[in-house]
Image (tube, rainbow, N blue to C red):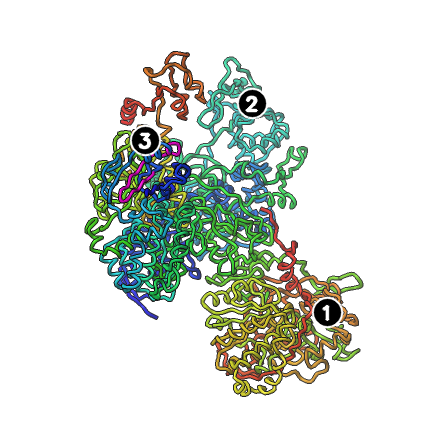
Amino acid sequence: MRKILVGMSTCGISAGAKDTYDKLAELLEGGEDQLDITGCIGMCFREPLVEVREGDRRTIFGDVSAKKVKALVDYLNNGGDVPESLVFQSDNGTIEAGEEKHFLEGQTRIVLRNCGVINPESLVEYEAAGGYEATRKALLEMTPEAIIEEMKASGLRGRGGAGFPTGLKWSFAAGNAGDVKYVVCNADEGDPGAFMDRSVLEGDPHAVLEGMIICGKAIGASYGYIYCRAEYPLAIRRLETAIAAAREKGYLGTNILGSGFDFEITIKQGAGAFVCGEETALFASIEGQRGMPRIRPPFPAESGVFGKPTNNNNVETYANVPWIITNGAAEYRKFGTEKSPGTKVFALAGKVAKGGLAEVPMGMTIEEILFGIGGGIKEGREFKAVQMGGPSGGCIPAALKDTPVDFENIPKTGAIMGSGGMVVLDDTTCMVDMSRFFLDFTQDESCGKCTFCRIGTRRMLEILERIVKGEGEKEDPDRLAELGERIKEASLCGLGQTAPNPVLSTLRFYMDEYAAHIEQKRCPACSCGSLVDYVIDPEACTGCTLCARDCPVEAISGVKKEVHVVDQSLCVKCGKCVTSCTFGAVLKTCPAPEAAAVTEEAGQ
Amino acid sequence: MKTLTLEINGKSIEAKAGQTVLEAVEEHGLDKIPTLCHSPELKPYASCFLCVVEIEGRPGLAPACATPVAPGMKVTTKNERIIRSRRTALELLLSNHYADCMAPCMTGCPAHVDVQGYIALANMGEYGKAVDLIRETNPLPGICGRICVRKCEVVCRRNDVDAPVGINNIKRYVTDMPEAFDHDPVREPSRGQSVGIVGSGPAGLTAAWFLGLKGYDPVIYEALPGAGGMLRYGIPEYRLPKAELDQEVDYIKKAGAEIRLNTRVGRDVTLDELRAEHGAVFLAPGASGGKGMYVKGEDETQGVVRGVDFLLEKTQNPEPMTGTVVVIGGGNTAVDVARTAWRLKADKVIVLYRRTRAEMPADEMEVHDLLEEGIELMELMAPVGIVRHEDGSLKALRCVRMTLGEPDASGRRRPVPQEGSDFDLPCDWAMPSIGQTPLVEEILADQEAEPGVSRWSTFDIDTRTMETNVDGIYAGGDAADDGPTVVIDAIRDGQRAARAIHSFLSGEPLEKEPFGVTKEFWARPGKKELGEIPQSPRHEVHTIPVEERKGSFAEVATGYHHEDMEHEAHRCLSCGCLAYDWCDLRLLAEEYDVDMDHFKGYVRKHKVDDRHPYVVYDPNKCILCARCIRTCERVLPISALGLVNRGFQAEMRPAMNDPLVETSCISCGNCIDACPTGALGAKFAYDGRAALALDTEKSHCGFCSIACPITVCSISDSRYFMRPSGVPGEYLCHDGRFGAELFIRSKRLDGPTLREGMEHRAITHGEAYERAAAGLKAAVEKYGPESVGVFLYPDVSNEEMYLAGRIAREGLGTNNITSIAVLETGGTSGALDESFGFTASTADRAALRDADLIIVNNIDPQNYFLILGTEIMDAAKSGAKLVVTGSTRQALADIADLYVDPMRGTAARLWNCITRTLIEEGHFPREAVEQVPGGKAFLASITAYDADTTCQITGVEFNKSHKAAQMIAAAKKVVIVHSPDRSRDLAPGDLQVMANLSLLIRAAGGESELILPSLAANGAGMEISGADPKFAAGRAPAKGLPGARTREELFGMLREGKIKAALVISEDPMSTDRVASYFGGVEFLAAVDWAQTETTLFADVAIPGSTFLESGGTRCNFEGKVQRFSPAVKPPAGAAGWQVLAGLAAQLGLEVPGTVDEITADIAEAARAHLGPHLPFLWNTGEERNWDGSGRLVVADASARPFPRVPAFNAAAFYRRSVREVGLEHFRVGARQ
């Protein structure tokens, strides 16, 4: 009997997996094949994905849109040429063939062990994959101290970004007396370009529940909250399904598995405030208050949700827990580095050729991840930098691509590990504009409490806005650096303390780009709208007049069938001509370097 | 308390565990750490980040307000990095602070005269204060009020509405009032140092004024025979009368200035001599040299006279003249010269100007008058030559016509001569009036000191300090810097020089220029922002008719009439911030030398929300410290304020973004007092909005028996408001915060009156006492003393009650004294005497803090006892259980653990049932109950209160009352709060029922206290002060006089119409028909009240009394504490209430003490004599209560019977009720912005 699975996480669904599924259901109706869904397999760049499982053999086809389903079914039933991309094929865990063989070969899947493998809505499948073994072991065989010791021994560090040792954190919460304690799972993933936690929640929700239950046992809490952003409706639905199933099966509720231990989990939906990813703001939001951070200490282990001792970890951290309990700390330590054991899930996005989810052992270099797994840069362009840690993080330039990705080495570059977003930038990305983008995000998402974060980031943004418009002043980089430092050192929460990072890190590595914008009024990446000239390539122009007709300010002149010209003094840089031209004759250029030379001379 | 050791600024200190770094630093006086968002009574919040400190080992800076101390911590509270961070925080906050610290008129005035302030004072009729305020920056208000160029009006925001406010004319108006000069300036003690000043013009006079006030001895050297410089010799009499000048010069002399006339420096005395004689020298010799026309031969021609010389001569010798006069120039001097010549009857006067009228620098008003007087203005013409008679005298002026070309450096179009347009203008006099130049050579000739001089013959100075390059020599006025300017610039120079000289001579640091932001920093607000302001035409000054001017130097402008001044004052938009003097943001910006340009960027602009009757919210000034929100959270169960939006868009807004007036806001105003800037402000009960100097006086609030400490802030005896004490966490309710509006806006009695039919005739106080005494006496003689009564409202002071009691007993020979309001609420004499042995609260509010159960019966704290309610909420938040009973749901019920709603008038029965349950279930053991005196009878009586009947009568299900019983059984310390005079849920016997419950809890081994807050401010003082039929002063048993023996008896007599004459004090029985009917048979009525009431209108003799802000004396608060009241403002009719009663008593032949303190002492002494030193009233001597908790169980009348709603029996009670229930528009302060 064959099993046919469709990758139905948010990425798949948005690529059309739902239609693919429906079409498959229609065509397979009455047949022997069993159709089912699964979570994200990680290869977002090939969605929709369809997996065919026969015994231990897994074959995955990519780009299977609904209209290609028929051909695929024909092929499966009748053989012949493979009609769709054969993404990869594995047998008994060994990857054998396929276009994207490398993508999975380079990975080590602990957190994502079930993602894209099991049906996330089926507790039976989860159990079949070894699910709830860890819970059974922790609840029936281990003392809280033993669990914490095991966690400490594993060396697992918080995957939310700060990398605080998880076992140690648990021991703090365990050490604080209190009749009521809470386990909180931070599922308020908010970094632009990050979707690791969502994929885990959608692909393997029970693993997170298990992690929380075990944590509850370890710290003496019998109540858990999952704080999930409302923008993740599918994750929430799957969590709800999972919680209901676990409760029915006795993994949640009173006297779990006869252990005498009680545990309940409630989902709290966040209203999409980025700052609620900050734990004290998250607690305030759970309590029904406005999501605003408060000062620490007191730390959550002492006074968290409703003023009670609380342990807060993120989704990925909890998802690691059952694996560690089942396989033991020693096994876990086999992956990763001495100080950063285990694996880390990254979301590859931006200009990388193969965007998606990749779980790799800690210590793998940036180059290995981006080029080995991610397949390098899109369209073969030049790798410029990778942005890590989202709005709190920074850029690692191409020159540092051999930096091992772990908690020790990444911060040395000025970036942070963050929760796992890797936004890849190529030579068409303007670093000033990218800093502006992140700052725009943080200054919008600041809760508005602290002076520096509320007004300081706004002022930084204004400076960046004028730089990208070519109106920057000579002192602006210094102003940015100065204000950035002030904001970092005098903000209450992580959002403010890290908000200037994208700017500070680009100032460190790409000062020349800032200088070009300010002094020469040019954008070396040809990206900043106001600093780019649109010119018509006389070789390519056919004189079709389309661009001239579309130009809103009549800056393009030319007679029919003759080469057209853009009058730069009239051009408002809207870029309409680029899209109008069907011959690719309109080019974006930076002003000629001569102009820069003249400016320099004038300056002297 | 656990302590720990840490190091702050290198000093090892012991701090309490749990303290914050800020608290530790403050406690040990180690530094003054700035903060905007923190206040000690609030939980740490940490948003402003001004309090940052450095903690060793931590990467960033830590907010001291929210960082707890830790052992071994090393803290630095001040260094370069910290200061830089604080400055940045301030710069960021101010970069989004679209506000005006000072009004544009104030910043626009070179001397920074507080225009808004004096306009507000003028509007209040406080002319003397207005002039004094001007003199704080400008000692020549009368002069400036006439001739100032009014830079203030140029920048007045009303320019964008219609026309500027007539600022200068208001200034003249107030200076013309007699109050302006009716008091002498106050000098600081003499410093014995003198300063030499050269020149008595505005710069010299101003410097002399400020130096004189500072205690220096300024000596002015004046070359001419009169003081004033150009003010005397340059500005003609018809514009600035010499008498006005003399008056101001004399006033400056009173500040210590000596003026040596006819003493020319350089001739009669030298600069070096001045230096030797004085500690410092200020050179302000002016610019007396007139400039010529630069035309050949002008100096040799008879008939060519410089304008300034002409004015100098004609001031001293105003001889008439003949011939045609041509004045050359377009400035004020040219106009002055022309108009002077016209007044001296010159045959024809022509003003020649090379541009057009529009470009003339002269005051527009002056040019208007000039033309009105028939003087000819020849535009676009310039002199190029002179035509002489044969005798060398002037025949004509050769002129050329001009056209206007391109704009020049001044922005005005440059006049260009038209070639060949020359012509001769026949004339007898040509008077160039086109500018002056300083004459400094004479002063400097052959001197050792050589102050630098510019090529324009002016002294080179540092314009911030007016220092020359020679130590101790300063220069200003027309002879310094960029040369001749206007009077107000000279005044500024004098001001700055005085400041710098003071610093030079005293060694004190130079006073900083005040910091201030203004909206113009971003952009002039303009029509878009001011568009909604209704237009209102500007009033100009009145002038004398033209025909009266010729040949006369009478002042042309006669100024404003009162209506004009009032009209213009109302046109003022009050742009400047009312929080100017105490705004922490502004003060810190000044301290930290903030640079506004540093982070200039987009500024958010908001509309001011003034829809609330008492609170104005200007979001532009909000710094999001959330102190208002957090304060509101402490005062109300659900905060009326909150935050909306995120990031830069975040704003403090009323809950759900509704207008504040539509939220749960109770108008207590505590948010205003929490605001560290001027974002939240109060509306006043009077006109005039400005940051004005306030007299402050500590007192207590007399609106209810909580008697909260208040600060009375007054501008005058009729403009004042109340504020909290200033102690963090001491709040006020609406009445305490805004209630002064009642006294200011009510119809006050302004003098005693005698009613003759429907007419009220004003009489003197003496006459009033005579008439009142005679009327009462006559009734005593006619009907006997038992037919006369004295009635007072229980919010008058103990002293007034005491005097009223003596008037009744000793003056009229009757025991008939009480309050009708108390009678109406069933008040009985000595209501709890049988239970406790006294009638008062058994503890003070501190008992709430360690209570584990609080029972709130018949009080609605958020409405009537806010401050007590806040303390109850605090206790509940820290763990005390709360039971609330009341027939109407109230805010406190929201946070109560149990809310019980018995029908009105049945609470006593309900509580008896609860008591019965507690006995039956063994929580109050029978044996223990029997041990209490009266216990057996009580046990027998309590069985009547069975659950079923009680449920039927009260409407409360048994499970609720049972739960209450269980909560009492589980509690260790129960505090019962019960209001004895709130008629809503009052029930007969409820006081006894509560007392019994309290005694039973004690008998069962628990602790219990009874607290009795009363709506009337001095309900607790009636018996102790002798205002009760049963008790004389000190609660001594009343002697057997005719009349009632108890309140109940007196009530009966009243209802039966047995009272034939009465003295009514601050009570208004005539306001309701039912009560008025008791007075149907009254033949003589005397009334004392601060307000006009139905009763004072009806009374045969009405005498004005006083409010609690005016009278002094004491009141007994709900805790049994005797609180002092200050006479913070004067009663409008002169006599305080106690003085009126003392006068009346004296008229009746009594000997009464002469001061209010002596009366207080008399009552205190009587109380000690009869009650022992401790119980139950504490006379501010720190005594402890020493009641042993014993008492008697009294079988109370617990029949269910609601009391009628008691009418508000006086103006204050009427006000309190109206504000809450009717929202009385009359008292709501004006919404004018």
Q: Secondary structure at mark 3?
A: loop
Badge 1 and badge 3 both on one subunit:
no
Q: Which mark is residue B1086?
A: 1
Dividing the picture into quarters, in which one does residue B425 lie? top right
A158 sits to left or right of B720? left
Residue B849 lies, in percent from the top left, at 47, 70
Helix or strand or loop: what does disc 2 sit on?
loop
Residue A22, quarter of picture: top left
Task: Decide whether residue A21 is among the magenta residues.
Answer: no
Marked residue nearer the N-terminal end (1 or 2): 2
Which amino acid type is marked by label 2? Glu
Look at the image and give the residue range highlighted in magenta: A50-69
- Which mark, by number, is residue B379? 2
Q: Can you tell which mark lies on residue A390?
A: none
Structural distance between the alpha carbons of marks 1 and 2: 77 Å
Q: Which residue position is annotated with label 3?
A: A83
Residue B1108 horizontal/vertical position (percent): 60, 65
Q: What is the crowding at mark 2: few (fewer than 14 residues within 10 Å), some, or many (at least 20)? A: some
Examine the structure image and report whether residue A61 is included in the region drawn in magenta: yes
The kind of residue tagged 3 is: Pro
* Image-based side of B1084 in relation to B36, left or right: right
Q: Chain of mark 2?
A: B
Q: Chain of mark 3?
A: A
Of circles 1 and 3, which is in front?
A: 3
Q: Neighbour class for label 3 at 10 Å: few (<14), some, many (≥20)?
A: some
- State the residue in front, B999 or A142: A142
